[in-house]
Amino acid sequence: MLRGETSQGGGDNVSDPLFIAEPTIIRARSYNTGNKKWSALNEAFYTIDGLSVDATNFVVSELHYHPNNPTTPAELAQSSDRDDFEFIEFLNTGKTTIDLSDIRFEAGITFGSRRTPF
């Protein structure tokens, strides 16, 4: 596996299959011995046994929109902007891990769950 070094001998030459036992990010690049340059870094995320999200295993369980202004010392220590206390809570209603890597809100909320098993 390449560990990010820039010298020719800095990584491991991997030609055998890789076996993974948990959600994993694999980063790889190749070294051209002819021009002595590295390729661009490629990255992929792999999940293990995660079910696709659907209405049988995933719900929005709480929506905290437009909360009151923060008043307690603990809240004010974090922020005086009530918008910072908004949240959406998701609930996995199934019995196994679900894969949230491709869920997105269509509009109105900037959120992405890239590489987040749930």
Image (cartoon, grey):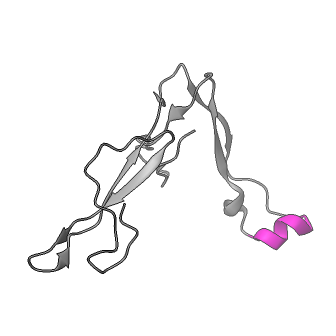
Q: Looking at the picture, how far across and down is residue 53, in whole percent? A: 47, 29
Judge by depth and name the residue closer to the eye, 13 or 84: 13
Region in magenta: 71-80
Judge by depth and name the residue closer to the eye, 54 or 80: 54
| Quarter residue 104 falls in | top left
Is residue 24 a member of the stretch shown in magenta? no
- Location of the C terminus (image quadrant): top right
In the image, taking residue 117 as reference, residue 5 lies left or right, namely left
Judge by depth and name the residue closer to the eye, 2 or 107: 2
Say whether residue 28 is visible: yes
The answer to whether 74 is drawn above or below residue 63 in the figure is below
Residue depicted at 68% across the width and 62% down the height: 84
Judge by depth and name the residue closer to the eye, 16 or 52: 16
Is residue 74 a member of the stretch shown in magenta? yes
In the image, taking residue 102 as reference, residue 77 lies left or right, namely right
The answer to whether 34 is drawn above or below residue 96 in the figure is below
| Quarter residue 92 falls in | top right
Q: Looking at the picture, how far across and down is residue 115, in whole percent? A: 47, 49
